[in-house]
Image (spheres, rainbow, N blue to C red):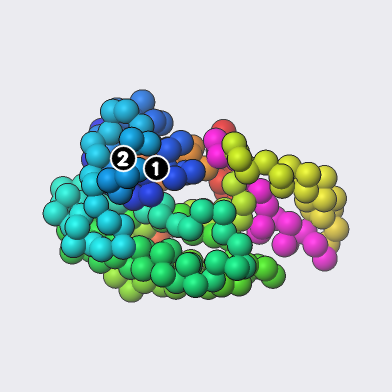
Amino acid sequence: MSRRVFVTGATGYMGSSLIPLLLQRGHQVLALARERSKHKLPPGCQPIIADALNGETFAHTAEGADTFVHLVGVSHPSPSKAREFVNVDLRAANESIRVAHNAAVPHFVFLSVAHPAPVMKAYVDVRVKCEAAIEQAGLNASILRPWYVLGPGHLWPYALLPFYKMAEFVPGMRDGATRLGLVTIHQMTAAFLFAVENPAFGRRVWEPKEIRQFR
C-alpha cells in the first residue's frame, strides 16, 4: 500500500539513504529541507522548504500524511555538542511531535539511540526526553534505537567489531555489547522501511539486536 510519508532531516545521513528506498517502493515522500539544502534532496520527492525548528513553517504540509518520520539531529554527535543536542535535536523533535499530533498523523517514526550507555550522556538524555514527549503526546510510534550506524563516512568503528565479538562471549560484557551493538546503514534503512509499511499501534521499540535482523 502506497503511503504518504513526511520526512524531516531529509538531506542528512539517514534521510538521503531512506528516501530513495521509500520512492522505489512506491511511497509518496514529502521531504523537509532548508532553502540552501534543497538541491541535496533525492529526485522524486516533494520538497517542503521549511525550518525544522519551527513547526509553524511546515504544519500545514504534514496534514494528510500517513507517517511522520523524524530524522533531524546534529551531525557527528560528540560530548562537546551537548548544547546543540538541546537547541537542535530536542527542539526539532518537540516541534515535529506537536505538528504530528495536531495534524492527527496516524504513525510517528523516530530515530533515537540505544540506552542506557556509559558515554554520550547528553546525547542519550535528549533522546530519552524525545521518547517521553512522544509517549506524552499519545502518538502511535515506532522508535529505532541504534548505537552507531556504519556506512559511508562512518567507518572507523569497524575496527571495534572484533572487540564486540569477543564481548558477546564474556558474561559480564555480553549485555552491553548486545545493547550497544553496531548496525549498518542498510540495516537501518530496511528497518525504517519496515516500520513505515507496518505501522505500530501504541509504541514499538527497535533495539540494535532487532535492527540487525534486517538486511
Drawn side of residue 145 relative to residue 192, left or right: right
Tell me the element at label 1.
Answer: loop
Give, as a single range, the part of the protein colored magenta.
172-186
Q: Which residue is mark 2?
A: 38
Q: Residue at x 48, y 67 (%)?
A: 85
Q: Which residue is mark 1?
A: 11
Q: Residues within 10 Å of mark 1 (few under 14, many from 20)?
A: many
Q: Where is residue 50? Give x, y as percent.
A: 24, 52
Task: Where is residue 139? Give x, y as percent.
Answer: 30, 63
Question: Residue 171: which quarter of the image?
Answer: bottom right
Residue 124 covered by magenta stretch: no
Q: Quadrant of the C terminus?
A: top right
**Is 158 on the left-hand or right-hand side of 152?**
right
| Mark 2 nearby-residue class (10 Å; few <14, some 14–19, many ≥20) | some
Residue ID at (51%, 53%)? 75
Q: CA distance from mark 2 to mark 1?
A: 8 Å
Left or right, 168 with respect to 208, comes to right
Marks 1 and 2: in contact by CB < 8 Å?
yes
The amino acid pointed to by label 1 is Thr
Q: Position of residue 162 (x, y in %)?
A: 82, 45
Please name the residue shown 48% across and 39% down the image: 189
Q: Looking at the image, which residue sits at the far front? A: 36
In this rendering, the label closer to the viewer, 2 or 1? 2
Give the main secondary structure of the magenta stretch: helix
Disc 2 or 1, which lies upstream in sequence?
1
Residue 203, disc: none
Image coords of residue 5 (percent x, y): 28, 43
Please, what is the three-letter code of the amino acid marked with disc 2?
Lys
User: Would you say residue 83 is visible in this rendering?
Assistant: yes
Q: Is residue 69 visible?
A: no
**In terms of image quadrants, where is residue 193?**
top left
Q: Secondary structure at mark 2?
A: helix
